[in-house]
Amino acid sequence: MDNLLIKRLTAYNAYWYAVRFTDDTMPFKAMVSALKSYGRHAAYWQKSAFDGYGGWLVRADILEKYADRFDNFENRVGIARRTYERLRRQGLA
């Protein structure tokens, strides 16, 4: 399976991420199908995420389970976590 590419990733808190990803049709559809299988308690599409472009809201443990499907997972998650922690320290998150 070809790996996906995370385009945008934001940590909402320690337990949830918002993510947009892309790549070829088959890996993309497989990942969307996997996320849909969890239902709203763990992963769902939010149309208003990322300035109205939409994104998946996914529990951190679920997204980390699929880390191997993304080429840039570690990099993007690291940036998202550091940004969230910085904003939290500043009282903005």
Image (tube, grey):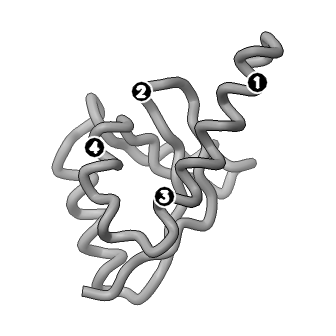
Q: Nearer the viewer, residue 27 or 11?
A: 11
Q: Is residue 10 left or right of residue 14?
A: right
Q: Is residue 25 left or right of residue 82?
A: left
Residue 90's place in the image compared with 36, above or below, is above
The label on residue 74 is 3
Q: What amino acid type should be assigned to the residue bearing mark 2?
A: Tyr
Compare marks 4 and 3 and give the one earlier in the sequence.
4
The label on residue 87 is 1
Compare marks 4 and 1 and give the one earlier in the sequence.
4
Eye-nearest disc, 4 or 1:
1
Residue linked to disc 4: 62
Q: What amino acid type should be assigned to the residue bearing mark 4?
A: Ile
Q: Nearer the viewer, residue 15 or 37?
A: 15
Q: Nearer the viewer, residue 33 or 72?
A: 72
The label on residue 15 is 2
Q: Residue at x 28, y 35 (%)?
A: 42
Which quadrant holds residue 4?
bottom left
The Cα–Cα distance between marks 4 and 3, rounded to whole angstroms, is: 15 Å
Compare marks 1 and 2 and give the one earlier in the sequence.
2
**Image spot of residue 85 (x, y percent):** 66, 26
Secondary structure beneath label 4: helix
Secondary structure beneath label 2: loop
The Cα–Cα distance between marks 1 and 2, rounded to whole angstroms, is: 16 Å
The Cα–Cα distance between marks 4 and 1, rounded to whole angstroms, is: 24 Å
Residue 57's place in the image compared with 72, above or below, is above
Q: In which quadrant of the rendered image does the C terminus lie?
A: top right
